[in-house]
Amino acid sequence: MNLTHIEHIGIAVKNLDEAIPYYETILGLKCYAIEEVADQKVKTAFFKVGQTKLELLEPTDANSPVAKFIEKRGEGIHHLAFAVEGVEKALQEVSDKGVRLIDKIPRPGAEGLNIAFLHPKSTFGVLTELCEKK
Ligand code: CMX
């Protein structure tokens, strides 16, 4: 599999309006996009640091993965996303090697990416996303 870079780090927050000023005022980053991803039941806010992005995730539904994460573990780093060339082939490859897939086929994510998650129970505790530009 050919991972090219860390595409983004996903960070779960209760409220974007409360979290964004920390990234802008204290860290001096600029929020360049806010996007709702209905499929994932989140509202996202994006920042860029070099070629890596930070993706803040606010749950839009109490039964969503991010809402459950915050309830159980509190706000904080939620997932790590790698850019990969050929996400479908990469999924097949990791599945063949025994990694548990959350998504057997990629689905639409924020910023026009095709995304798929690997289960944290088979990735040493890190919810891992593989993604590729459509
Ligand atoms: N990172 C690491 N571990 C996590 C985790 C995370 N983000 N989320 C859950 N876990 C752990 C739980 O703590 C639990 O561990 P224990 O059994 O030791 O307590 C285990 O994984 C199973 O968790 P669960 O609560 O029983 O299962 P959930 O119903 O919460 O589902 C998961 C967990 C990862 C399968 C689910 O959150 C999922 O499908 N995630 C993928 C989709 C997603 O996260 N979308 C939001 C982001 C979208 C975007 O970036 O656009």
Image: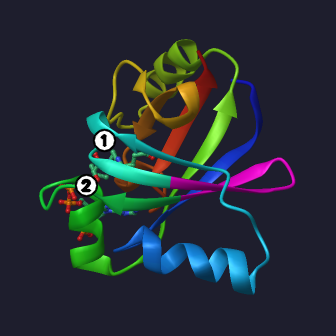
For the residue labelled by badge 1, is the local secondary structure a helix, a strand or a loop? helix
As drawn, the residue found furthest toward the bottom would be 26
Q: In this figure, which colouring scheme has been used for the structure? A: rainbow
- Circles 2 and 1, Cβ within 8 Å, touching? The answer is yes
What is the span of residues highlighted in magenta in the rendered image?
45-55
Quadrant housing residue 21: bottom right
Residue 48 on the magenta segment: yes
The amino acid beneath tag 2 is Pro
Residue depth check, mark 2 versus mark 1: number of the one nearer the observer:
1
Q: Residues within 10 Å of mark 2 (few under 14, many from 20)?
A: some
Question: From the viewer's perspective, is residue 33 above or below residue 16?
Answer: above
Label 2 beta carbon less than 8 Å to ligand 1 = yes
Residue 40, label in figure? 1
- Residue at 55% from the left image edge and 13% from the top image edge: 89
**Mark 2, residue position:** 65
- Main SS of the magenta part reads strand
The N terminus, quarter of image? top right
The amino acid beneath tag 1 is Gln
